[in-house]
Amino acid sequence: MKRQFTFLSVLFLISISLFASNNTENKKKYYNPKQILATVEKVADWQLNSWKKDGMIYPKWDWTNAAGYVGMYHLGTISKKSDYHDILLSISKELDWNTGPERFYADDYCIGYTYSKLSLKHKDPKMITRFRLLADSIVAQPHTESLEWKNEINHREWAWCDALFMAPPALSMLSIATKDPKYLEITDKLWWKTYDYLYDKEEHLYYRDGSNFTKREANGQKVFWSRGNGWVMAGLVLLLDNMPKNYSTRAKYISLYKEMAAKMASIQQPDGSWHTSLLDPERFDVIETSGTGFYTYAILWGLNNGTLDKATYLPVALKAWKALESAIQPNGMLGYVQPIGWQPAAATQSSTAIFGVGAFLLAGTEMYKYTKKSKIAKN
């Protein structure tokens, strides 16, 4: 009898334990991919409505908008709404598939990424005719000038780190659209030229341009701009997406990507973001969403593609995503975007810009993909 009582007691304790465990599991909150998508679409829709109501601040071909188009295109690949690709097609037709006025200025052909994507989607090579002619002239240049920051070198070469977002994704995507490897080859050549000049191999960060080599922050640290390095990491990921898995220098890019990802993880702020001055975060002690958006995108891409390990980088990505969500206003406007600049500066709750929205849309697209295939607890 005593033995039977003991057995029943053990069974009772086990059942209580299982109930408590299940109850705890039921109380857990998980990221819902549908809610993620709804959040991302809300921000994108605010941007579309802003264009409709107030027009664009800068020309439709301008880098500011072109960076936003990249995010808009990626969102369109996961959304059931056709609006995001439709608006890009409409803008491109209005521009007659032209890039900006300067042939060798990376900012002016950032839009070539969107043209190449649309050309592939619609199976229409005429969409990239003009961009291809421009790219041919880039390939034909010797590219022997120094990247020293003088004589408007940025209008001829990739002499500032932003260019690594503006140009490599566009040219490498053109190689896919045309099945001609020469555009990827010139991208590869020029990427490493910029790397050799601007990458700090001790800090594992890019200077914005050569004028920053000797500058120091108030705390004595080197000056590294958050959005500038965000441009690099996002451009690197987009380039890797366009690069064959067996490409001769791919391993070098992956090594650079992992090196920068580790650096970003080590300097992420307690609020989940990266402030505009990466090594002096207290100088502008507030979140900034364009740089943070690009880093979140790049890190989630690494998780989605098995390039980064989950244990180390998923917590980084989730903290960053929460920071981004906190910057969305009730009407869908993304705040805390540092205005156009070339160095660390302040961002405010009311400061927004299309390139910051583009960064958020890229991050949101990867967050959606990750939560769709993996169950992630919020707490």
Image (tube, rainbow, N blue to C red):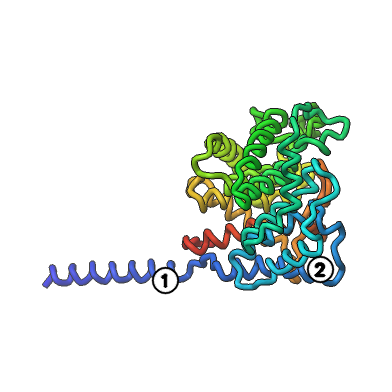
Amino acid type, mark 2: Ser
- Please tell me which of labels 1 and 2 falls first in the chain: 1
Q: Position of residue 227 (x, y in %)?
A: 74, 46
Circle 1 sits on which residue? Answer: 23
| 314 to 55, vertically: above or below | above
The extreme left residue here reads 1
What mark, if any, has residue 323 been given in the picture? none
Q: Position of residue 299 (x, y in %)?
A: 58, 49
Does residue 15 appear to the left or right of 215 in the view shown? left
Q: Position of residue 140 (x, y in %)?
A: 73, 35
Q: Are marks 1 and 2 in contact (CB under 8 Å)?
A: no
Crowding at dot 1, Cα within 10 Å, few <14 / some 14-19 / many 20+, comes out as few
Does residue 293 appear to the left or right of 243 in the view shown? right
Crowding at dot 2, Cα within 10 Å, few <14 / some 14-19 / many 20+, comes out as few
Q: Residue at x 82, y 45 (%)?
A: 345
Q: Residue at x 68, y 58 (%)?
A: 71
Amino acid type, mark 1: Asn
Quadrant of the image containing the N terminus: bottom left
Q: Position of residue 230 (x, y in %)?
A: 69, 45
The answer to whether residue 224 shows anywhere in this view is yes
Circle 2 sits on which residue? Answer: 50
Q: Nearer the viewer, residue 287 or 138?
A: 138
For marks 1 and 2, give the CA distance: 45 Å
The answer to whether residue 270 shows anywhere in this view is no
Based on the displayed image, in which of its 4 quarters is residue 36 positioned? bottom right
